[in-house]
Amino acid sequence: AAALPRRPIRELPDELVSQIAAGEVVERPASVVRELVDNALDAGASQINVKLMAGGVRSIVVEDDGIGIASAELPLALRRHATSKIGSLDDLEAVSTMGFRGEALAAIASVADVSLLSRTASAPHALRLDARSGELGPAARAVGTSVEVRELFFNTPARRKFLKSDSTELAHALEAVRRHALARPDVGFAVWHEGKLVAQWRPARLDQRIRDVLGEEFLEGSRPVEHAAGPLTIQGRTALPELSRARADQQYVFVNGRYVRDRLIAHGVRSAYEDVLHGQRQPAYVLFATIVPELVDVNVHPTKIEVRFRDGRAVHQAVHRAVEGALAVSRAGEVAQAPA
Ligand code: ADP
Ligand code: MG
């Protein structure tokens, strides 16, 4: 230890701090898509278009018809910890937007070429800001925002090496949009790859959206879930055992509209299938948990894919009962239908 030279403590330059933060938030093109679509939804968009080139590695464009960014704030949108969504700890505890960390655009701009094109309802025209050059100028666009992200990880070759084939990256990006599409059936989504339309979901009611995203088979082979337990409600659809899968690839859980991975909820669901699913078979489900914001902490993980519940046991129990109830009704329903 005595031989180790002491190095001075230094504050890291802003750019490097952002790149380190980007490591947590931006893993691949799909992460960029997720963040940009989150922003579009927070802006009240009713139609969101995602355009990808080379699986999103070469470029990702997300266009929305939301409220836009005020001209004067365009440079601010790219700054770290700059957000219009919260301003205090109280806001954070009751947060209802997808974003609140003010980190995504800054993180993305530190590992890719980003430009913002936006127009608010009161602006005479749109403005375009190129993040790298800082160039700001007038542009043509209807009210809303387009964010363009080019050459992801161009300046971090080590990260770029972790990217998979274009088709794999495209599949991940599509999955990211699929999750948003399930969470927001009222919003239209369209995805293009290399100029070709590869997915399109028009605004619909939830059941129709579930059919559009997961297919007729899932809708027909699943039962509605509807359960209220105090400050918590569980809704959605859960598939009959016949639709169980070898992989856990059709398990969608949303907490207050946000897609999450939660072991507690997954376990609660699985336990409701205990008697009817054998071995490693995985149930398929789409569940929406709605809970008073104060009872769930969404600020646990930089990508917010994990949440922490104040009362995990109550959530587990509610999920178990909700799914058990849905499956039991379906069995009783089939018996009851027989004489009719
Ligand atoms: P956060 O979403 O956590 O606030 P971001 O870095 O994703 O952080 O975005 C920073 C800010 O830029 C947002 O708070 C919002 O004001 C603005 N913004 C980003 N994308 C959009 C968009 N598509 N439409 C309108 N405003 C946007
Ligand atoms: Mg955001």
Image (cartoon, rainbow, N blue to C red):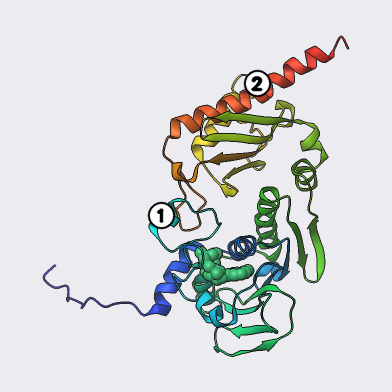
| Residue positioned 85% across, 12% down in the render | 338
Mark 1–mark 2 CB contact (< 8 Å):
no
Between 227 and 52, the one lying in front of the other is 227
Image: 59 above or below 225: below
Toward the top, the furthest residue is 339
Residue with the most extreme front position? 122
Callout 2 environment at 10 Å: few (<14), some (14 to 19), or many (20+)? few
Q: Secondary structure at mark 1?
A: helix
Q: Secondary structure at mark 2?
A: loop
Number of numbered discs present? 2
User: Which labelled disc corresponds to residue 276?
Assistant: 2
Residue found 66% across the figure and 53% down from its top: 180
Discs 1/2, front: 1
The quadrant of the rendered image in which ligand 1 is seen is bottom right
Label 1 to label 2, Cα distance in Å?
44 Å
Front residue (pair 186, 208): 186
Visible in this render: residue 104?
Answer: no
The structure residue drawn at horizontal position 39% and vertical position 78%, both measured from the top left corner, is 14
Q: Quadrant of residue 128?
A: bottom right
Name the amino acid type tagged 1. Asp
> Which corner quadrant holds the C terminus?
top right
Vertical position of residue 55 compared to residue 318: above or below: below
Q: What residue is drawn where x is 79% and y is 12%? A: 335
Whole-percent x, y for residue 51 in the image: 73, 69
Q: Amino acid at mark 2?
A: Val
Relative side of 52 to 253, left or right: right
Q: Quadrant of the N terminus?
A: bottom left
Q: Position of residue 19 (x, y in %)?
A: 45, 73
- In the rendered structure, find residue 90 and report the number of the disc placed on it: 1
